[in-house]
């Protein structure tokens, strides 16, 4: 395999967006940390939860959350699709990205005004999904950037 070439994107004051608070719900710790890293690089404040119950508690405690990024498959009282519907019903303005590596959930099962991204995805795909829901997401990751290989 050829080595990845990495580039650093400098942030100018003109490129800095208003910081958006994003809640990432992912039970795989390394994936959760990686998502938080990239979303922070894109100019967001990130809160993390391991399951839907933690996510709902954080949603209730932080009225400034504007975007939920959740995996579909996770342990606990509800999966990511049920969590997405719960968030849509209780906090209608919150935007939602639902992700999964297992594509067995039809788009019609997701809440309206949500975006689905298939795993594995690259930072620029995450940026594109977040930008679709909340314009001005900060600098776009370079096309050759990838999540850390584990």
Image (cartoon, rainbow, N blue to C red):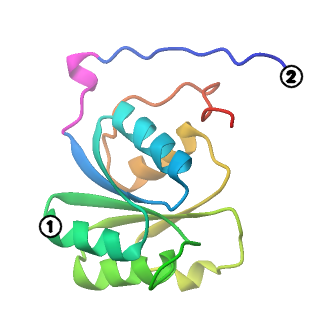
Q: In this view, does 130 lie above or below 88?
A: above
In the figure, 58 relative to 41: above or below?
Answer: below
Taking 80 as reference, is 105 left or right?
A: right
| Residue appearing at x 34%, y 40% in the figure | 137
Name the spot of residue 121 as percent of width and height, x first.
63, 47
Left-right relation of 84 to 46: right
Residue 108 locus on image (x, y percent):
57, 84
Image x and y of residue 107, in percent: 59, 78
Above or below for 51 versus 10: below
Q: Nearer the viewer, residue 67 or 134?
A: 67
| Residue 93 can be seen, yes or no | no
What's the mark number on residue 1? 2
The reply, left or right, for residue 147 in relation to residue 83 is right
Seen at 29% across and 85% down, the residue is 89
Residue depicted at 60% across the width and 35% down the height: 147
Does residue 73 show up? Answer: yes
Q: Mark 1 points at which residue?
A: 61
Residue at image point 47% right, 80% down: 76
Which quadrant of the rendered structure holds the N terminus?
top right
Q: Is mark 2 on a helix, strand or loop?
A: loop
């Amino acid at each position: 395999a050829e080595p990845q070439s990495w580039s650093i994107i400098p942030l100018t004051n003109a490129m800095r967006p208003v910081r958006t608070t994003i809640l990432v719900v992912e039970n795989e710790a390394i994936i959760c940390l990686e998502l938080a890293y990239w979303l922070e690089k894109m100019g967001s404040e990130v809160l993390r939860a391991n399951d839907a119950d933690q996510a709902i508690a954080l949603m209730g405690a932080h009225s400034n959350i504007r975007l939920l990024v959740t995996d579909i498959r996770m342990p606990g009282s509800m999966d990511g699709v049920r969590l997405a519907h719960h968030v849509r019903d209780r906090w209608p303005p919150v935007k939602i990205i639902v992700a999964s590596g297992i594509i067995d959930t039809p788009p019609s099962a997701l809440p309206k005004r949500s975006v689905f991204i298939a795993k594995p995805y690259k930072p620029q795909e995450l940026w594109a999904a977040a930008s679709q829901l909340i314009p001005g997401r900060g600098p776009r990751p370079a096309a050759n950037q990838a999540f850390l290989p584990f």
